[in-house]
Image (cartoon, grey):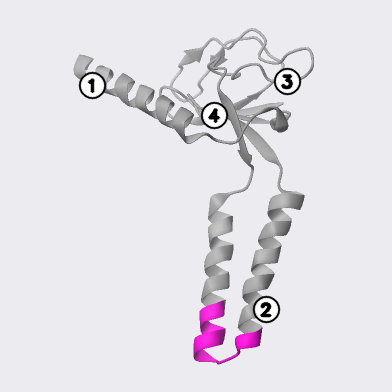
Amino acid sequence: MNIRFACPACDAPDRFDLPGHDPWHCSACGHIVNRPIDPVTAEGKIACCALCGNADLYRQKDFPQWLGMTLLAGACASFFVLAVIFYQYNLAWIVLLGSAALDGLLYYGIVGDVVLCYRCGCQHRGARSHDFDPFELATGERYRQERLRREHVQEKKG
């Protein structure tokens, strides 16, 4: 299982593979994180985040958002050009519906899932993702508020 994350101290991207029990050292700033002893159960399910030990995890599609938005913008621009400028309505609809079909094929057939931690955003690739629910806004907001309170306290101290 491949774990990808940003360093909690300097936000430098890094990764490591499971299994592994040694502390993680950031190559950029030297920050040390003592990882949980065994985040994976005997059945192969992730019990907690491999970086911070948080038990609240969720799944999402492992697809770059920039690529999806590029496909959408290209389809919309093509539709506009074909329909409004060249008056090729049939071709314009074929392009638009074809892009929707391509999007559906990518979403349901090709692209897999990744498991993420609500607290630190650590990505667990290669995990059994269907053991986890999709992102829940209430849980995400709770962790966002926790992060904001921590940053506010650090600003007061510093």
Dot 4 and dot 3 residues touching (CB under 8 Å)? no
Name the residue beneath numbered marker 2.
94
**Label 1: few (<14), some (14–19) or many (≥20) C-alpha neighbours in 10 Å:** few
Of callouts 2 and 3, the N-terminal one: 3
**Residue visible at 22% across and 14% down?**
157
Relative horizontal placement of residue 61, taking residue 157 as reference (left or right): right
In this picture, which residue range is highlighted in magenta? 79-90
Amino acid type, label 1:
Glu
Q: Mark 3 points at which residue?
A: 45
Which image quarter holds the C terminus?
top left
Residue 133: percent from the left, percent from the top? 62, 32
Which x, y percent locates residue 123? 59, 31
Looking at the rendered image, the disc whose residue lies closer to the viewer, 4 or 3, is 3
Q: What residue type is labelled 4?
A: Phe
Crowdedness near tag 2: few (<14), some (14–19) or many (≥20) residues, C-alpha within 10 Å: few
Closer mark to the observer between disc 4 and disc 2: 2
Judge the density around disc 3: few (<14), some (14-19), many (≥20) Cα neighbours within 10 Å: some
Of the numbered discs 2 and 1, the one sitting upstream in the chain is 2
Q: Main secondary structure of the magenta part?
A: helix
Distance from disc 1 to disc 4, alpha carbons, whole Å, reads: 24 Å
Q: Name the residue under label 1.
A: 155
Inter-mark Cα distance, 4 to 2: 40 Å
